Amino acid sequence: MTAKIIDGKEFAAGVRTKVATHVARLKEENHIVPGLAVVLVGEDPASEVYVRNKHKSTLEVGMNSFEHKLPADTSESDLLALIDQLNNDPLVHGILCQLPLPNHLNEELVINSIIPSKDVDGFHISNVGLLGTGQKSMVPCTPLGCLMMLRDHHGSLSGLNAVVVGRSNIVGKPMANLLLRDSCTVTIAHSRTKNIETLCASADIVIAAVGRPEMITGDWIGKSATVIDVGINRIAHPTVEGKTKLVGDVHFESAKEKAGAITPVPGGVGPMTIACLLANTLTACCRANGLEEPEGLTA
Ligand SMILES: Nc1nc2c(c(=O)[nH]1)N[C@@H](CN(C=O)c1ccc(C(=O)N[C@@H](CCC(=O)O)C(=O)O)cc1)CN2
């Protein structure tokens, strides 16, 4: 039997509807409009698309969107001055700097200049520490989206064996912490892991976040396991010359024959990233105003 395909587009639409409903209630009952500020430095084409989609989605759920597009040669001090201004703006509840930043800017310094309560990417060192110690924090959007889909599919994750392939600060490590918090037995695998295929094949859940196109094939997947593919890789189209196509870190065709459930690329985890950004902005706004947090939209 082939796997259930977890439709990230549909799931993300459901998250956005929940956010929009909660935002409408905030406006009606508390006269508060959540606001998201997105900072883009430079003209990376993919980043421009993501920022445009963030702006559009923010407005669609009824929030305020503040876009700040800066030239590629913006100095670190100018960028930090803008973040300081946003940190102190009461209309702004969430701030993010689109990554990657141009090389001359220190990514860590910039991220850590956002006040943790407005850090809707969950990348600030304080939020990383809070998540790692099981305390309330802002949670990175992509792992939060994966967690929502896993909870929806499995109900409880308690006692399940999860292998996270990839150890990045943005996905692998926070994902592992979230799964641990939901009482999974978690292994982080990476380029130096021995017997990685066997390890993955013994898992109930495989999270692929390694950044290598179609690395994880069907023979790495245990019968009926859940496979969440975080990878977004653009490769040469196999049959049409001069064209490209998007693939994940999982070889979808072979993995879906073994898995119980699997996310596709595109249309799986990707759409959840922006939906969870909206959820995080709403959460940040509720926390800032001492209001109840939206149910089902946080970790
Ligand atoms: N500050 C941040 N920068 C970046 C993040 C982030 O979470 N915070 N993540 C990525 C880019 N990203 C959002 O910013 C993002 C990536 C992919 C998608 C998405 O929906 N992908 C689609 C495919 C899109 C395509 O056709 O190219 C999918 O997987 O279906 C949304 C958001 C790096 N930077």
Image: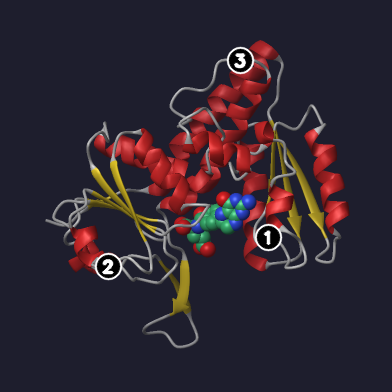
Query: What's the residue at 52%, 38% (across, down)?
Result: 139
Q: Marks 1 and 2: CB-CB under 8 Å?
A: no
The Cα–Cα distance between marks 1 and 3, rounded to whole angstroms, is: 33 Å
Disc 1 beta carbon < 8 A from ligand 1? no
Q: Quadrant of the C terminus?
A: top left
User: Residue 51: x and y, percent?
Assistant: 66, 53
Q: Is residue 190 visible?
A: yes
> How many numbered marks, from 0 up?
3
Q: Is residue 117 left or right of residue 236?
A: right
Q: Residues within 10 Å of mark 3 (few under 14, many from 20)?
A: few
Q: Amino acid at mark 3?
A: Leu
Q: Secondary structure at mark 3?
A: loop
| Res 291 label | 3
Decide if residue 16 is in sight here. no
Question: Which amino acid does the dot numbered 1 rest on?
Answer: Glu
Check disc 2 and report the residue beneath it. Answer: 194
Residue 212 in percent (x, y) is at 41, 71
Query: Vertical placement of 213 versus 190: above or below?
Result: below
Residue 246 against residue 4 in the figure, above or below: below
Closer to the N terminus: mark 1 or mark 2? 1
Looking at the image, residue 73 sits to the left or right of residue 43; the answer is: right
Please name the residue that numbered disc 1 is placed on: 48
Front residue of 263 and 241: 263
Q: Residue at x 67, y 19 (%)?
A: 27
Eyeballing the image, is 42 above or below 173? Answer: below
